[in-house]
Structure formats: structure tokens, C-alpha cells
């Protein structure tokens, strides 16, 4: 082999390695920056009295095919910013944030400026369609609904023109005998918190045009004179439904404050549940009657007011099989001869089969129709998951009480809901939520765990009994480092490649204040003692560290000046997770599912709220929106494939052949020409 051929072969191998390495990798490029001065605090203040700006919204509000940014400011203004220029990749500078300015704005205090009243802030923001789309894929304009700190609800169109206004406080105190002065005192002294705003094209009355649902919690101090009312308010979450066109109230709901411990009566897998015996007459049933539907809306985690969300679904009760009684069989008529019995039996069977087939076809068609029509609102709240009827507001069921900063999901696929949390330096996984009774995993995530080859790949016959037990539990249960902090874990869903055929796996990812990232997985394949157990999958030290210093706000509540977190990142909506984002105080680290650091991003300012994963430029790939005190920063995700490198390789090979082959042919023909001469 000549040196030239060897060099070409080495070049081809190098390009193939580069192509395979770039396949499926991503990078984040700077997109835009929207200036926003804010004094908001990132963590939930339990009194609800601290101002917290609503979560910024990225959506196509006017139906032009381009995304818009909807946000608010602390002085009571709503802004709509078009992201049309960001959708063009030619206008995005990779090294600079493109500053954008508002195109439309609405001042909620404009009408009260001349009156000299106190200015009020925006504490809730939502958007959505209120008209049903006639054609599939049809774009339409959306409405924007804002909830103010003075208990007012404003509905705006896509041009921020006011459509209607409603007063929530009048609905709250409608059953209380208060004077106008007392109502105004409540309006100025208290305000709702943990606000939920949702808009849907479904209607309660025939002449309605969509619905607007507003949910919130009331401060407990609001009813100090009434002890019973104050106790109810501590666990209450109120809902109010308005007509989307006129703002007329359609129904209102205040959560039933009665809690029950159903684990005292039933086991987790019990099928015969008499829930009505232990519940009130409100029509509410125990959550295990809809366990499959509840598990469909997992994982549930509440770390921040931004995690308050709602989604529509269709809940149907499970049908109970009819059991024939012996008495009914004895009352059947005797037909006499055996042949007559057989004939009549065959006729009855054929007629029943035909009837059942026709009924099944009709039922299937009806079910397909009704399954598309939602009938419940599933709300993820700080106290748990609540399911209410969409058209009456009555509570159907609720999965509560749940703890904050805890992930709820069936992690090990055993049909039971597990709870994963971080206790100082311990990663703890318990089974049997909402009332856990068994600890599945407890191990420190604040220190590196030196593992041998057998422990790393979980080979049971090469590990001792002590090593097998160490995979799920620490020897030193008292190991705690008060100088370190651990954020709420992230749940990563992916398809595992450790076993064929591939199966769906769920891993838990923990981030410490030093930047240590620990992945915990449930090992089905090589489990010690033949029993599947949790184990540490990998650990990596990332630069996404953060300080533990706490600051006190004026109200005396404890809060943080930044919001560190660990996030599971899917490339597209409704897909399994492909990467992990570790958000520290100054840096954001992109990690793949094998624990390899892909990219490190220097944050311009610390994030004060959970980052949002939304599609900014319309390429169906999720991007990142970071909220800081100075404003909103956005990063665009670029997915890299090996096709570009392979295309370059093929083109270069053709070029080489086009150059080398003529030279080679010319060198062969040249001796014959010289011999003739």
C-alpha cells in the first residue's frame, strides 16, 4: 500500500469518526434578550404577599405563523413582542443576544392613574383559544387573561384591547356580610397567590364562547376573625369559570378541605373500594378509582409557582362486570328434548353475537367521539393533583396530600407510585405515595462513590454481599454535609440500551451545590440477589455550582437570590429525554444520558425561576428561555447530524477521483508516446 492510499484511508476513517461523534449532538446559540427590570423573588413565599411576576409565555398569539413573547413588568404592563426575526437563522448572531423591544403594550393601571389609587401588579397570566377550530391545522387568534393583585381579572384580545373585566373578590366574599369599606380593606391588604389561568374553546352554556378558568389560593390571614374559615382557607384552592366572550360567571368551586387517609382502609392493589362510605356527598371518589388516569399525568413535582399548571382530559369510570346469579339460572324455561335445546341455544348464541357486535360497534364509535371531548381539568398544585369536572366545577378526585420538592412517579414500573426527594445530602426513594411505607433507596449524593468494575456494570456474581447492599443503601447513615445543598431531582425517561430488546427506563438525576451530578437508575438486568434494585449509574463533576447563602426579603420570608435546578431535556415535545441540563448560579451544563459533558454555557445573570423549554423559531425543536432579574434571555437549540460530514466526505472522494484518475491514465499513456518518437 502506498503512502498516498494510506493517507486517504486514514482521512476517511477520521471523517467517519467525526460524523459518528456529531450524530445526535446539540449546541445552544444565543437568540434574544428582552430587558425587564424586576424585584421578584424566585421561591414561593408561603404568605403569598411577595410580588412574583407571571411566567413569560411563548406562543403564536395573532395566528401569523410566528411565535410571540408575552410577558409583564413590575409596574403593571403587559407586553407582546414578535419573534419573527428570531425565526430566521440568518439574523441570529451566535455570539450576541439580539435585543428585542415590545410592539404592543397594555397598562393595567392606566385608568386608575388619574384617581390617585395604589398601583397593582400582575400576578397571573394565561393565553388560549376560545373558539373551536373549524379545520385541522387552522391558525386563529388567541386571548390573553391577566389576574391582578387587586383581585381583578382582565381579558384582552391579540392586540391587547380590553374585552371584559371581572372582580374575583366580590365572588369570594359573596357569602359573607361585609360592607364596602371592609371589602376594599381586604382588596388592599391581601392578594391571591399560586394563581392558575387557563383558556379553552369548550363552553358551559350553549351561547357561550369558550371558557376562562382562574384558580388561586387565598391568604389564611384574610379570615382571622373566623377560625373555621381560616382553617378551610389553609388547604383551599378556589376555581372560578367565566364565559370567554362576556366574562359572566358560570360556576365557582372551593376545594373541600376534608382530607382522608385511605391507606388506613385499603391496600394499594385492592380492587373492591367503597369510597362513598368515607367521603362526603359532593360526588368525590377516591383517587384509586382513576389510578390509571392519575398515573398518566405523572410525574408530578412542585418546586416553584411556575410549576402550577392544568391540562384537560377525559375521565371515564371503569365498568364493573355483571355476575349471573344461580337463582336466575334455575328460573329458565325447560325446552324438553336435547335437540330442541341445542337448536334454541345455537339461535340464542348467534342472535346475542350479532347484537353484541352491533352494540360494540356503536359503543366504539361513541367512545371515540367522547374520548376526544374533555370533561375534567387536571390541576398540578402545591398540595397535590386535583381533578375537577370541567362543566360544573365539582371535585371528581384528588391525589393528595403531596410534598413539595418531591418527584412522584412509578419509577421502577411495579404499578405503585414512588416518591423521590433529596434530604440534605441523601437521595431517598420511597414506595406507596401519597403515604409512603417502604424505603427503596437511600444513598448520599454529596460525595463521589468509587466503584469497581463489577459495581459499575452491576455484575452480581463478581460482587460481595457488602458491595451488593452498598448499591442501594449507605453504611454511614449519619453522613450529612450541612455546607452542601441538593436541588429537587429530575426524572429522565429514555430507552435503555443495556438490554435487548430495549425497554423504557426512568432515571433520577441529582445536583449538589458543588456541581456534582449523580444519576440513579433501577437495574432490571443485573440486580444483586436476583432482586431488581436502585443503584448509582454514573457521577460527573460539572461547573454548575451555586452558593448556599440565603437572603431575607422585607416580609421576613426565606428565599434565594437565584434558582438552581436540574432539568430533563427532550429534543421535541412529547419525546423521551435526550439530555440533562444542570443550571447553576453562573453556568448551565449540557450532559448526555451517559454522563458526558456536551457543552458549558456561561449565563449572563443568575436564573431566578425554572427555565422554560419552548419552541422559539418554529423548527419543532425545543429551545431554552431563562428568566433573570435583568430580563429574559433565550437560547436556540441546534441539532447536529453526521450527514454534513458524510456529504463532505463523499464530495471530497469524488473530487480526488476526478483529479487522480486522469493523472494516472496520463502516466500510463506517456511511455508509448515516447517510444514512437
Image: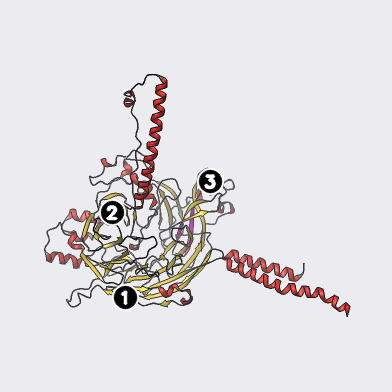
Taking the spot 58% from the left edge, 51% from the top edge, the residue there is: 454
From the viewer's perspective, tell me whether residue 109 is left or right of residue 655.
left
Q: Is residue 515 magenta?
A: yes
From the viewer's perspective, tell me whether residue 248 is left or right of residue 649.
left
Q: Is residue 545 magenta?
A: no
Mark 3 → mark 1, Cα distance in angstroms: 62 Å
Residue 436 appears anywhere in the view: no
Which is more toward the observer, 191 or 640? 640
Q: Main secondary structure of the magenta part?
A: strand
| Mark closer to the observer (3, 1) | 1
Which is more toward the observer, 108 or 560? 108
Name the N-terminal-most of marks 3 and 1. 1
- Disc 3 crowd rating (10 Å Cα; few below 14, some 14-19, many 20+) is many
| Mark closer to the observer (3, 2) | 2
Mark 3 → mark 2, Cα distance in angstroms: 48 Å
In terms of secondary structure, where does tag 3 sit? helix
Taking the spot 34% from the left edge, 76% from the top edge, the residue there is: 103
Q: Quadrant of the N terminus?
A: bottom right
Label pair 3/1, CB-CB below 8 angstroms? no
- Disc 2 crowd rating (10 Å Cα; few below 14, some 14-19, many 20+) is many
Q: Quadrant of the C terminus?
A: bottom right
Residue 186 quadrant: bottom left
Label 2: which residue?
Answer: 390
Label 3: which residue?
Answer: 528
- Residue 348, position in %: x, y? 38, 30
- Residue 264, position in %: x, y? 32, 42
Mark 1 → mark 2, Cα distance in angstroms: 33 Å
The range drawn in magenta is 508-526
Give above or below for 462 relative to 585.
above
Residue 155 quadrant: bottom left
- Residue 232, position in %: x, y? 22, 54
Label 1: which residue?
Answer: 104
Amino acid at each position: 500500500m502506498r503512502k498516498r492510499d494510506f493517507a486517504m484511508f486514514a482521512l476517511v476513517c477520521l471523517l467517519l469518526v467525526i460524523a459518528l461523534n456529531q450524530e445526535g449532538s446539540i449546541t445552544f446559540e444565543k437568540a434574544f434578550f428582552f430587558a425587564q427590570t424586576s424585584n421578584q423573588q424566585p421561591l414561593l413565599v408561603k404568605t403569598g404577599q411577595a410580588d412574583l411576576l407571571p411566567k413569560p409565555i411563548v406562543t403564536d398569539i395573532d395566528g401569523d405563523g410566528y411565535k410571540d413573547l408575552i410577558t409583564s413588568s413590575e409596574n403593571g404592563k403587559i407586553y407582546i413582542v414578535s419573534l419573527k426575526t428570531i425565526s430566521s437563522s440568518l439574523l441570529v448572531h451566535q455570539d450576541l443576544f439580539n435585543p428585542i423591544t415590545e410592539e404592543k403594550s397594555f397598562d393595567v393601571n392606566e385608568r386608575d392613574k388619574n384617581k390617585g389609587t395604589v398601583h397593582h401588579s400582575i400576578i397571573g397570566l394565561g393565553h388560549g383559544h376560545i373558539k373551536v377550530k373549524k379545520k385541522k391545522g387552522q391558525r386563529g387568534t388567541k386571548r390573553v387573561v391577566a389576574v391582578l393583585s387587586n383581585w381583578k381579572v382582565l381579558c384582552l384580545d391579540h392586540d391587547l384591547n380590553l374585552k371584559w373585566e371581572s372582580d374575583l373578590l366580590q365572588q369570594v366574599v359573596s357569602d359573607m356580610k361585609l360592607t364596602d369599606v371592609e371589602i376594599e380593606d381586604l382588596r388592599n391588604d391581601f392578594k391571591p397567590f399560586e394563581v392558575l389561568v387557563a383558556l379553552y374553546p369548550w363552553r358551559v352554556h350553549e351561547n357561550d364562547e369558550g371558557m376562562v378558568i382562574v384558580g388561586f389560593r387565598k391568604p389564611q390571614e384574610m379570615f382571622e376573625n373566623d377560625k373555621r374559615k381560616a382553617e378551610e382557607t389553609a388547604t383551599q384552592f378556589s376555581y372560578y369559570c367565566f364565559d370567554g366572550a362576556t366574562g359572566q360567571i358560570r360556576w365557582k368551586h372551593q376545594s373541600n378541605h376534608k382530607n382522608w387517609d385511605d391507606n388506613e382502609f385499603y391496600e394499594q392493589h385492592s380492587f373492591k373500594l367503597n369510597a362513598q362510605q368515607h367521603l362526603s356527598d359532593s360526588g368525590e371518589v377516591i383517587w384509586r378509582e382513576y389510578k390509571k388516569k392519575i398515573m398518566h399525568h405523572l410525574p408530578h413535582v412542585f418546586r416553584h409557582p411556575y410549576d402550577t399548571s392544568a391540562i384537560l382530559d377525559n375521565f371515564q369510570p371503569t365498568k364493573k362486570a355483571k355476575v349471573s346469579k344461580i337463582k336466575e339460572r334455575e328460573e329458565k324455561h325447560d325446552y324438553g328434548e336435547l335437540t330442541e335445546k341445542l337448536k334454541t341455544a345455537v339461535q340464542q348464541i348467534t342472535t346475542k353475537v350479532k347484537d353484541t357486535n352491533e352494540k360494540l360497534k356503536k359503543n366504539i364509535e361513541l367512545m371515540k367521539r367522547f374520548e376526544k371531548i374533555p370533561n375534567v381539568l387536571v390541576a398540578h398544585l402545591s398540595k397535590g393533583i386535583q381533578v375537577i369536572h370541567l362543566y360544573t366545577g365539582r371535585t371528581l378526585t384528588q391525589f393528595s396530600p403531596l410534598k413539595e420538592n418531591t418527584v412522584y412517579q412509578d419509577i421502577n414500573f411495579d404499578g405503585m407510585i414512588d416518591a423521590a426527594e433529596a434530604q440534605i445530602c441523601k437521595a431517598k426513594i420511597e414506595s406507596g405515595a401519597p403515604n409512603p411505607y417502604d424505603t427503596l433507596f437511600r444513598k448520599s449524593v454529596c460525595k463521589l462513590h468509587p466503584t469497581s468494575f463489577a459495581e459499575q456494570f452491576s455484575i452480581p456474581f463478581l460482587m460481595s454481599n457488602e458491595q451488593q447492599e452498598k448499591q442501594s443503601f449507605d453504611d454511614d447513615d449519619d453522613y450529612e454535609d450541612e455546607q452542601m445543598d441538593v436541588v429537587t431531582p429530575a426524572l429522565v425517561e429514555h430507552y435503555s440500551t443495556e438490554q435487548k430488546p430495549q425497554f423504557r427506563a426512568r432515571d433520577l438525576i441529582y445536583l449538589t451545590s458543588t456541581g456534582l451530578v449523580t444519576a440513579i437508575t433501577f437495574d432490571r438486568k443485573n440486580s444483586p440477589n436476583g432482586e431488581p434494585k436502585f443503584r448509582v449509574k454514573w457521577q460527573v463533576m460539572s461547573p454548575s455550582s451555586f452558593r448556599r447563602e440565603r437572603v431575607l426579603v422585607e416580609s421576613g420570608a426565606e428565599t434565594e437570590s437565584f434558582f438552581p435546578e436540574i432539568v430533563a431535556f427532550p429534543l421535541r415535545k412529547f419525546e423521551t429525554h435526550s439530555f440533562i441540563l444542570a443550571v447553576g448560579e453562573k453556568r448551565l451544563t449540557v450532559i448526555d444520558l451517559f454522563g458526558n459533558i456536551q457543552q458549558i454555557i456561561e449565563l449572563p445573570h443568575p436564573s431566578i425561576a425554572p427555565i422554560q423549554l419552548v419552541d422559539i423559531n418554529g423548527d419543532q425543536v425545543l429551545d431554552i428561555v431563562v428568566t433573570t432579574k435583568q430580563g429574559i434571555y433565550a437560547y436556540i437549540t441546534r441539532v447536529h447530524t453526521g450527514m454534513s460530514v458524510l456529504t463532505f466526505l463523499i464530495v471530497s472522494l469524488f473530487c480526488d477521483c476526478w483529479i487522480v484518475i486522469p493523472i494516472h491514465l496520463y502516466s500510463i499513456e506517456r511511455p508509448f508516446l515516447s517510444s514512437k518518437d
